[in-house]
Image: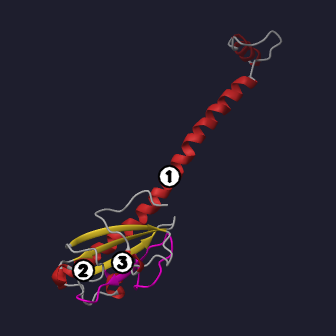
Amino acid sequence: MLQLLMRRLYNQRPTDLLEDGETEAGFTLIELMVVLLIMAILIAIAIPTFLGVTSSAKNRAAQSNLRNALTAVQSYEAGNQTYSGLNTSILQSREPSLSILASNSTVTKGTNQVSLDVGTTNYNTVVLAAEASDGVCYGIATYNGGNNGSSGLISTITTAGTYYTGVANPSGGCDATNLVSATWGSSFPSGLT
């Protein structure tokens, strides 16, 4: 039985067997070098792309935290017709996934912390700040249109609405009060480093 099995295996052996019974195996040095070169090129393309995507994701996380806090602020204002009385504990209870800090409190990079500043002149403006892990401080300001066309808190804002800013590595740290003098626009700025 064993001899029959051995004979069958011998008859079905690969055609690339050498005369002495050994097979050719492995790659030549040139083939290995070509494979390594192709891998190096692919890695050189992939690493910068990966780093760019992770940096962008970290910025988007800070911006998302601000949008979540803004939603909580707007729901508070909708019920009260003003931002009067809005403070960190109220906002914290409305958005428990974030850590809400008072104005003049610097947020920590890359965390779920958001700084809150409520304009106390007529309680018609709220500024929120969050810092991405790359040091960019993002801010959202919302103005409900009161006080004769002036937000009071941000002198450049005169029309009711929501405004966005971003400051790379602010000198005084990232908090809502430091962003009051920033340049505000209709969307988050891009390309900040």
Mark 3 or 1: the one toward you = 3
Verify whether residue 94 appears in magenta: yes
Residue 151 got which mark?
2
Quarter of the image that includes the N terminus: top right
SS assignment at label 3: helix
In this rendering, position of residue 17 left or right of residue 34: right
The residue at the point 22 percent across, 88 percent down is 122
Residue 152 got which mark?
none
Spatial CA span between label 2 and label 1 = 37 Å
Q: Which residue is mark 1?
A: 52
SS assignment at label 1: helix
In this rendering, position of residue 192 left or right of residue 180: right
Q: Amino acid at mark 3?
A: Val
Q: Nearer the viewer, residue 71 or 26?
A: 71
SS assignment at label 2: loop
Spatial CA span between label 2 and label 3 = 11 Å
Are the two marked residues, 2 and 1, in contact with CB atoms closer than 8 angstroms? no
Quadrant position of residue 148: bottom left
Q: Which residue is mark 3?
A: 180
Q: Amino acid at mark 2?
A: Ser
The residue at the point 39 percent across, 79 percent down is 176
Q: Main secondary structure of the magenta part?
A: loop
Residue 78 in the image, given as x and y percentages of width and height: 18, 79
Quadrant position of residue 128: bottom left
**Pointer 2 or 3: first along the chain:** 2
Mark 2 or 1: the one toward you = 2
Residue 61 in the image, given as x and y percentages of width and height: 42, 64
Q: Which residues are magenta?
A: 93-122
Mark 1 is surrounded, within 10 Å at the Cα level, by few (under 14), some (14 to 19) or many (20 or more) other residues, namely few
